[in-house]
Image (cartoon, rainbow, N blue to C red):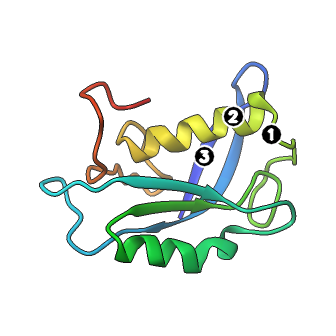
Amino acid sequence: MQLTVLVGPTGAEPCLVDADLYVPDGASAAAPVPAILTTNGFGGSKDDQAGAAAAFGREGYLTLSYTGLGFPNSDCKISLDDPDFDGKAAKQLVDYLAGLKADNSGRILDMVAKDSGAGDT
């Protein structure tokens, strides 16, 4: 799956994020589950998290695993934890988990448990 986020100092630079969503059995709007957001180490990809994400799913956690900015299938530049790039992208991925942002196919999640009615952003 792919998500486009807006990054950079002004938040106007589109950046394509390549991600996999692992949804545990039984997760739904009526039965929301906690979520985990993961990314790779330098030079890796979302595939590095596949085993852990599947294991989290067996324990009832939805996992969004994404390839770090600038690595395979991302049209962004590598920025090494820059708040204007990696920070803004991560916030928008949390917004996706909270059901406040659609992925590029238009899907909006409604199965993630929230701590409050404010969307947990």
Label ID, residue 4: 3
Judge whether 83 appears above or below 36 on screen: above
Residue 75 on image: x %, y % = 78, 53
Residue denoted by label 2 = 87
Residue 17 on image: x %, y % = 65, 54
Judge whether 22 appears above or below 89 on screen: below
Amino acid at pointer 2: Gly
Pointers 2 and 1 in contact (CB under 8 A)? yes
- Label 2 to label 1: alpha-carbon separation: 7 Å
* Number of residues whose C-alpha sits closer than 10 Å to that of mark 2, classed few (under 14), some (14–19) or many (20 or more): some
Q: Residue furthest left?
A: 30
Give the residue displayed 76% in from the left and 28% down from the top. Answer: 84
Q: Residue furthest front?
A: 59
Element under disc 2: helix
Residue denoted by label 1 = 81
Give the residue displayed 28% in from the left and 56% down from the top. Answer: 33
* Number of residues whose C-alpha sits closer than 10 Å to that of mark 1, classed few (under 14), some (14–19) or many (20 or more): few
Element under disc 3: strand
